[in-house]
Image (spheres, grey):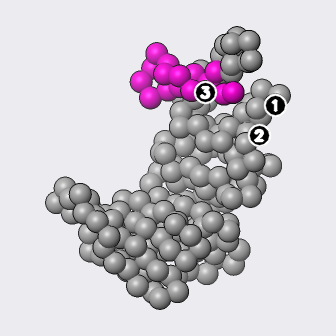
Amino acid sequence: PIIGAPSESVGELKLLSIDLAGQVTILRQGANDPLFSPDGKHLLYRRSLKDTLGLTVLNLATSEERFLAPELEINTEFVEWSPDGKQIVVNPYFSTIYLVSFETGSYEVFAEEGEAPAWSPDGTKIAFIRREAIVLKDVLGGNESIYTATPERLLYVQWINQDQLRFWSDKDGKSKQYLIRLTKGTFEQICQV
């Protein structure tokens, strides 16, 4: 199994492999925010590359590592695999959203303005925040649906299923959670902390 252990540097992990005999091998140091691919064969993480954090993929079977889209400095936790594992959505500067090809490492702008992207369960749409609204954008074709939610500052969006999203907002230090029902086009507050 692969596990993460704290590194000497704050916020970094060591990726360790432990075999059946209990032998520990350090695979990589300096990994940040590791994510397993949907098929469990690769590990995606941020790692230093020439004084910036780059998007890195580790093949768990061969221990080969490669950088994806090395021109993008990935300084955010908003990195997510597509459900089929073919693309990765990244939001490196909390403004522009990119799609990165897992196979080639090439990337393209998905949305000029937006933050906190999240893939739909079927991989056909990406939900994200743009100002005070939730935007659903088709991966193919680029059609957008905009849900004006609240005048509060929006923080995160998460798919529950293909028809429902939940999102968090913040106003005056109080966090609220809402539910959007896409087929009904409605949203409701479900809790406040």
Outermost residue, bottom side: 184
Disc with the residue nearer the chain's start (1 vs 3) = 3
Evaluate if marks 2 and 1 touch, with contact meaning CB atoms under 8 Å apart: yes
Give how far across and how far down residue 133 sits, in percent. 39, 74
Q: Amino acid at mark 2?
A: Lys
Q: Quadrant of the N terminus?
A: top right
Disc with the residue nearer the chain's start (2 vs 3) = 3
Give how far across and how far down residue 21 sits, in percent. 74, 12
Q: Amino acid at mark 1?
A: Ala
Left or right: 39 in relation to 46: right
The range drawn in magenta is 1-16
Left or right: 146 in relation to 47: left
Is 170 covered by the magenta stretch?
no
Which residue does the image show at 44% across and 73% down from the upper left? 134
Residue that numbered label 3 is attached to:
3
Disc with the residue nearer the chain's start (2 vs 1) = 2
Which residue does the image show at 70% across and 50% down from the upper left? 38
Residue that numbered label 2 is attached to:
41
